[in-house]
Structure formats: C-alpha cells, structure tokens
Amino acid sequence: MTHPTHPTHPATPDDTPDARRAKVQEVLDWAVAEVGVPGVVAELGDADGHWFGTAGVADLEAGTARQRGEHLHVGSAGKAFTAATVLALEAEGRLSIEDPVKKWLPGVLSVAANGYDGNRITLRHLLSNTGGLFITGLAPEISHRYATRGALAEHRFDLWTTRELLELTVSQPPLAEPGEVFAYSNGGFYLAGAVIEAVTGNSYAEEVARTVAAPLGLTHTFVRPAGDTLYPEPYPRAYSGLFLKDGVNPEDVTAENWRSMFEEPGLPPLDTTEYNSSWAWAAGNVVSTASDMLQVIRAFAAGTLLPEAQHRAMWTTVSTEGAHWMPHSRYGLGVFELDPAVTGGLTLRGMGGSMQGSHIVCVGTPDGERTITLHTNTEFKTWEVMFRAVEAAFGTPRVSGL
C-alpha cells in the first residue's frame, strides 16, 4: 500500500486559466466529433473561480444543449460516498474499518457461502476492492438482464432489494484470498451499505445525507430512491450503445471472442433515460450535479470532510495492475490516484463511474486548488476522454497507448 504524497504543480508555459479552459473546451468538442459522445459538460474549479463548458446535446431529438445544474447519475463515483460514510462512522467511534464483516453482518458471509469467510474479510477490504469477492457485474443475474438491448428493454424497470443484492454478492466463489488482489466488485460496496445500516439503524441514503451531503452543503446530491426511474429537472437524456448482440448468451463471451459478440458499430444509441438503477445501490446509485461533484472531489481530495486519520485511510492505495481496470492508477477506498509517472509528477486524486447512459470523472489536486468534473450522457467509451481532459486541466503530459 502507498500513502498520500504532497502535491506538486509542474510549470507550463501557457498555464493560465484562460488557456486551460480553452484546452478543455477543445477536448469537449473532440469527444462529440470524434468519439461519438452525444453531449458532454465539464466544470473546472481553481483560484480564479469556476468555469463551465459544454459540447453536443442533452437531447438528440430536440437538439437542446446541455446546461448548468443538470441532475446526473454518477455511477460508481457513489462508491466514494459509501467509503466516506463508513469512515465518518469510524471517526464517530461506531466502527473500525479493520472490523471483520461478520461482526456486523453475521448471517451474510460464512464459510458455507461459496467459500467466503466473513471473519477474514474486513471493511477496509470491501472499500478497497481487495476482499477477494468475484466481479459482481459479471454475474449471470446481471448480464442476462442488461447486456443486450432486448434484455434491457424487458428488465429496465426491475426493482432490486438489498437482500437480493447481498445474495448476488456471494453467488459465485471468491477470486482470491482477502487482501491478495484488487478486483473491482460492486458486491463489496453492497456489503458496506448493509454494514452502515446495521451500525446506525438508519437507511444507507439517510447516512450518506447526514455524513456527506449535509456537511458539504450539497443541495442537489442524494441517493436515488429505489423506485425512481427519472431525475429532477433539469437532466440530460441518457443514451447507451454498449450491448451484446441480441441472442448472445453473456456466459459464452470470452477474452478471445468478446469483440465479435458486441453489436456492430454505427447502430443508433438506445435512450435509457427512464431506467431503474436500484441494482447499483451502495455501489453507485447517487444523483448529483457537476457543481456539487466539484465540491465533493475538492473535499475528498483535500481532506476537509474527514478527520486526518480517516482521510489518510481513504487515500492509502493499492495497485490495480493486471486487473483490467483504469490504466495508470491505484485504488484507495472508493477513490483512485493517477500514477505520478504519467502526470509529470503531479499527484491527482479522483473518483468516477459509468453505467447505461452516463459517465462521470472528477479529478483534483490534494490541496483542492484545481478540480475538474466531466460528464457524458453516454457510458464510458475510451479512457482517452478522461486523460485528455486531465492533460488540458492540469497541464500533465499526453498519455498515449490507452
């Protein structure tokens, strides 16, 4: 594990607010014109204030532009909210991130549950994706509902209960021993959400509001109620184009044939705006705005929300190498740090998430002086969008080979 480092700011000849903002706008225009993103927004924060930029559209049919204040689904960036809530409870003396899961959820993880041992998996393991849990998003129960257009059309309003999500978490054998490897698993955060409720007697949503949203003054950020299928106004339409071909059995997809299993490029995107995302729950079912998320990454990166011990724990990172996750990164508790080797020595901290019709990335310096939030109204398409935006906003070197 590595621990936080102090920020450095590499000097660049055109490192002025206007130059940075112009470069970010170029990235937004490129994302629409070359990557095929329907619409994109970015908000920058620095010593000179806030800047908001946009390209493309919020609605393909109406042609309306994207705008400030849109309510956005932040996907797996919600994992950082879960981690912050657990760490806040630790600061209150109500739990420890070194607690074994079985202490709080004695009936969920046992040796009999497909080989999981709740006495050996800690809350820190859950929040750092090192508990050895299998990759929940690949579970047949998920892929058969959402991996093809036909399946999504049939199941887009399915309502998932907490019990179903916890059962899903242990439905496949573990990938590794606790603490052994990094494997990105929603299930670990489902368990963390259940621990939050067990410790406090309140709902997960109530505790996120109490420990994160209220202290930071976030007026447009909340855990989406399980039954909701739309967003408060204003919001962009959501468009998805990442599907297996209809008729493909997701279990037949392998590392060798996956390219041939996906839909042919050029098909029109599917409007997924009306959609029940209860399957994401404590692994990423938060709704926010670009402005609110700028406040969140500033607070999380700079340590203005949590006490020093918990802030340090959040940014104690593990390697993600070989995990087929974000390149050039290490993972903390619900958050990531970019490798200084590809940022010109600058420490950059972030959180992000992607789901049907939405992708968000939030990055900031550890002093909170520079931040960026970028959102597209389609799911992840390429890491180059994020790295180009980071290059423009922070003056980092161009990262190639993504």
Image (cartoon, rainbow, N blue to C red):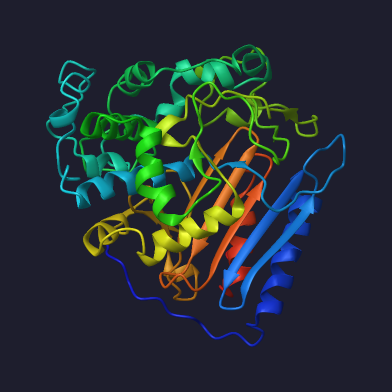
Q: 212 or 240: nearer the eye?
A: 212
- Position above or below: 266 against 151: below
The quadrant in which residue 215 appears is bottom left
Q: Quadrant of the N terminus?
A: bottom left
Figure disc tally: 0
Q: 170 or 93: nearer the eye?
A: 93
- Position above or below: 190 against 88: above
Residue 72 point in image, percent of width and height:
61, 42
Residue that appears at 15% across and 20% down: 111
Residue 14 point in image, percent of width and height:
67, 84
Q: Quadrant of the C terminus?
A: bottom right
Farthest right residue?
62
Residue 376 point in image, percent of width and height:
67, 46
Q: Is residue 309 left or right of residue 166?
A: left
The answer to whether any part of residue 258 appears in the image is yes
The quadrant in which residue 230 appears is top right
Residue that appears at 28% across and 35% down: 196
Q: 369 or 116: nearer the eye?
A: 369
The answer to whether any part of residue 397 appears in the image is no
- Position above or below: 399 against 231: below
The quadrant in which residue 48 appears is bottom right
